């Protein structure tokens, strides 16, 4: 597993040898009586979601509030990972370091973007997480959430915005992305 370079702000426009995915994760409000922290990780390639992911630059941990919270990160790609899928894991832990009692089974959701990078281009995607999933033993009584624990959202390349202005639901023509 090769870690991705992450930055909250990307300076300059020098992306001739690199590519950037502007990822926004719309984190849900905390509907639980205890504090919850969103711990988001990003990797490139085929890595099992249930594995511990290590390496890469850290993404700031976000303490969930009573309102939805947007988390914006720029993910840098290069020739090594241009065509690899981008995987994103959002865990909702009791502790910011995910080491509190019960955090080993903290609620989490997963995102797979089939292709996000095109060398010399910027793309973007917004992932909206509606609520913190229910996990047996994590809540009493459990709140209602229609997002399943460890659910996977898969995003085909044609749903990743980029290389075209205006509003559209698809960023491909004839199966080819506008950035290709």
Image (cartoon, rainbow, N blue to C red):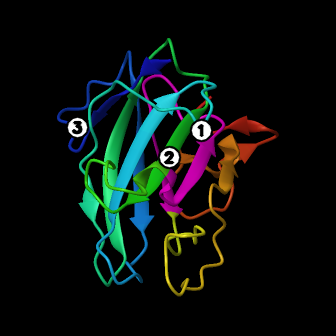
First of labels 3, 1 by sequence position = 3
What secondary structure is marked by label 2?
strand
- When the figure is inspected, residue 47 is found, relative to residue 166, above or below; the finding is above
Of marks 3 and 2, the one in the foreground: 2
Residue 126 drawn in magenta = yes
Percent position (x, y) of residue 16? 36, 19
State the residue position of label 1.
Answer: 49
- Which residue ends up furthest to the right in the rendered image? 174
Asked if marks 3 and 2 touch (Cβ < 8 Å), the reply is no
What secondary structure is marked by label 1?
loop
User: Looking at the rendering, which quadrant does residue 86 occupy?
Assistant: top right
Percent position (x, y) of residue 135? 58, 67
State the residue position of label 3.
Answer: 10
State the residue position of label 2.
Answer: 89
Q: Distance between the residues labelled 3 and 2?
A: 22 Å
163 sits to left or right of 159: left
- Which residue ends up furthest to the left in the rendered image? 11
From which residue to which does the magenta span run?
105-127
Residue 156 in sight here: yes
Percent position (x, y) of residue 54? 39, 27
């Amino acid at each position: 597993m090769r870690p991705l370079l992450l930055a909250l702000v990307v300076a300059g426009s020098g992306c001739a040898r690199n590519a950037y995915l502007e990822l926004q994760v719309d984190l849900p409000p905390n509907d639980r009586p205890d504090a919850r922290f969103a711990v988001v990780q990003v990797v490139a390639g085929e890595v099992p979601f249930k594995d511990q992911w290590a390496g890469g630059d850290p993404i700031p941990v976000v303490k969930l509030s009573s309102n939805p919270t947007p988390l914006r990160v720029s993910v840098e790609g290069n020739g090594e990972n241009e065509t690899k899928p981008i995987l994103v894991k959002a865990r909702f832990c009791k502790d910011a370091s995910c080491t509190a009692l019960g955090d080993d089974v903290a609620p989490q959701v997963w995102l797979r973007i089939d292709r996000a990078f095109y060398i010399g281009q910027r793309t973007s995607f917004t992932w909206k997480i509606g609520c913190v999933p229910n996990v047996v033993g994590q809540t009493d009584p459990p709140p209602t959430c229609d997002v399943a624990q460890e659910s996977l959202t898969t995003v085909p390349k044609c749903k990743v915005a980029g290389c075209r202005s205006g509003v559209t639901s698809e960023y491909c023509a004839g199966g080819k992305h506008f950035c290709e």
